[in-house]
Image (tube, rainbow, N blue to C red):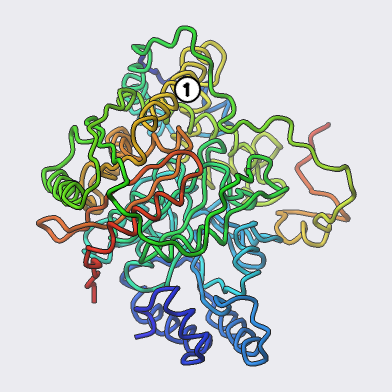
Amino acid sequence: MSIDISTVERTAELSKLYLSEDEKKEFAGQLSDILEYVEKINTLDTSGVQPTDHIIPNVNVFREDEVGQSLTHDELKLNAPEFDRGHFVVPKIIE
Amino acid sequence: MITSKTVVQLADLLTKKEISAVEIANAYIDRINTHDKKINAYITFNPEKLLIEASQSDKRRATGSELSQYDGIPVAIKDNICTKGMKTSCGSRILGDYTPPYDATVIAKLKEKGMTILGKLNMDEFAMGSTTETSCYGPVKNPHNLNHVPGGSSGGSAAAVAAHLAPAALGSDTGGSIRQPASFCGVTGMKPTYGRVSRFGLVAFASSLDQIGPLARTIDDATLLTSIISGKDTKDSTSVAPDNAIPETITCRDLKTVRIGVPEEYFEGVSDDTKHALSKKINELDAAGAQIVPISLKMTEFAVPTYYLIATAEASSNLARYDGVKYGARSKVAQNLDELYKLSRSEGFGQEVKRRIILGTYSLSSGYYDAYYLKALKARTCIINDFKKAFESVDIIAAPVVPSTAFRLGENLSNPLEMYMSDILTISANLAAIPSISIPIAKDAKGLPIGMQLMGPHFDEKSVFEIGKTIEKDITPLIADFM
């Protein structure tokens, strides 16, 4: 499986990443090598094998629906890039 | 020398009042200030805070109200484990200013025992790497040879313990990130069973594989720390409460009762020095009465593809949270929301992280999901079954940790695939969720440490530690002479 520049661009868009032209070229080559190597997995016969979705047999871990202590606005504000009166601020999204 | 004592020895000296917590803190402050310039193990180190906490500990002990016999012993922490009020960067620019408003459960558990946080340790960015060279804080050096890497991603943790810049440390292991650096730096590193230790407050990389564990100078210290940090946690629904809790202290296991499996696949492509050291050790165990059983783990060749598909898929999803909105770095030049996401992420993440996000996104994207991600989940089942079958006839599996000793700095930076393939011997334990330890056993011709890996069945850490302790008994500690 070889990855071309346009596939890298499309995947970068899905990943919300900007890549420079050099990065696109470098990633296309490296990802092609990696995918070629992981293709090996298709030589393994997995017919009838269940996928491992959960590694431990816990099912439906419930807890009581009780009001607990969570972080305060003041604590959240400390790490927020921009915070105003209890809200995270982002650039305008509706014209 | 205070800094050459183990955690168990420090506890003994504190209990006998032959030493104070402030003296321990000062000894480490001196040593870190003098020597960490060469190693670069620490990202965050706050001597003032440490001394305040140490003196509080001494006051508790003076009034007989110490929280445990370990009250006042400092432990250093990998920088992807959240520490309240202390920067937790993950070795990444995007979290460069992040100070968690809460403690990870493992940190809360250390503090319940009165243990103090010595500092935060360097690591590969978001734990993605095998050399600690992808950190935005610069590479860590191997204390056994400063031209070599300490391994990764818990390279700062391994180097700090090896260079006696910390009595012990916590790391995290997603594909070998505790055991591989432990092996490269000549210390003991334990990855517990998945679910044994709460992941609450561990910055997520690949949630079905990540596990926190200790790096220490002895098996006794590793056992003690694993015991302290383990247990079911309501804040991590994947943590479990097995019947067999890990005791704080253990004894040696009589090898005459032990069947040790040696998988042939784990010796393919392994360097001569490492192979020789392992064979010699296995022969000694044979002579000591252990039953050595040649076994085959046929799925080993599929471990690297399976791991890199699952780990990158989970990472691409976990790292979607870094969007420059709620916490983490925000780009200053974005004009709209989409640009804000993309610029913040592109400026904040390093190359290896971007590479893995793109690989993971690709394998999860429409049209490729079945061929890659779903296939990998099925291969994971095969790998789990491979180990289940092996543990029907053996009590423990012994193998090398890494195919070679520590790489030279810069050696593998330009070839990610080469680097991924060097994880082949450690990642199966993560995929199968079993406990696995790395114990230092020898040095190669260049003086670089070689580790031995012991893998046990699910939740049988006790056997891993007890058999490990028996093996450790006959080994001279590998001293790092970096000064």
The N terminus of chain B sits in image quarter: bottom left
Which residue is label 1 attached to?
B381
**Residue B273 pos. (x, y %):** 12, 48
Q: What residue lies at 47% left-to-right and 22% top-to-bottom?
A: B381
* Number of numbered discs overlaid on the protein picture: 1
From the viewer's side, name the closer residue of B301 and B43.
B301
**Residue B442 pos. (x, y %):** 19, 58
Q: What residue lies at 60% left-to-right and 58% top-to-bottom?
A: B106
Q: Residue furthest top?
A: A47
Residue B464's place in the image compared with A51, above or below, is below
- Name the side, left or right, on which A72 lies relative to B400: right
- Name the side, left or right, on which B45 lies relative to A1: right
**Residue B337 pos. (x, y %):** 71, 37
The C terminus of chain B sits in image quarter: bottom left
Residue B392's place in the image compared with A6, above or below, is below
Instruction: Classify mark 1: residues with Cα within 10 Å, few (<14), some (14-19) or many (20+).
Output: some
From the viewer's side, name the closer residue of B371 and B253.
B253
> Is residue B113 visible in this depiction of the protein?
yes
- Mark 1 belongs to chain: B
**Residue B221 pos. (x, y %):** 43, 66
> Is residue B139 visible in this depiction of the protein?
no
From the viewer's side, name the closer residue of B147 and B282.
B282
In the image, what residue type sits under mark 1? Thr
- Name the side, left or right, on which A87 lies relative to B274: right
Q: What residue lies at 51% left-to-right and 57% top-to-bottom?
A: B226
Q: Give SS at disc 1.
A: helix
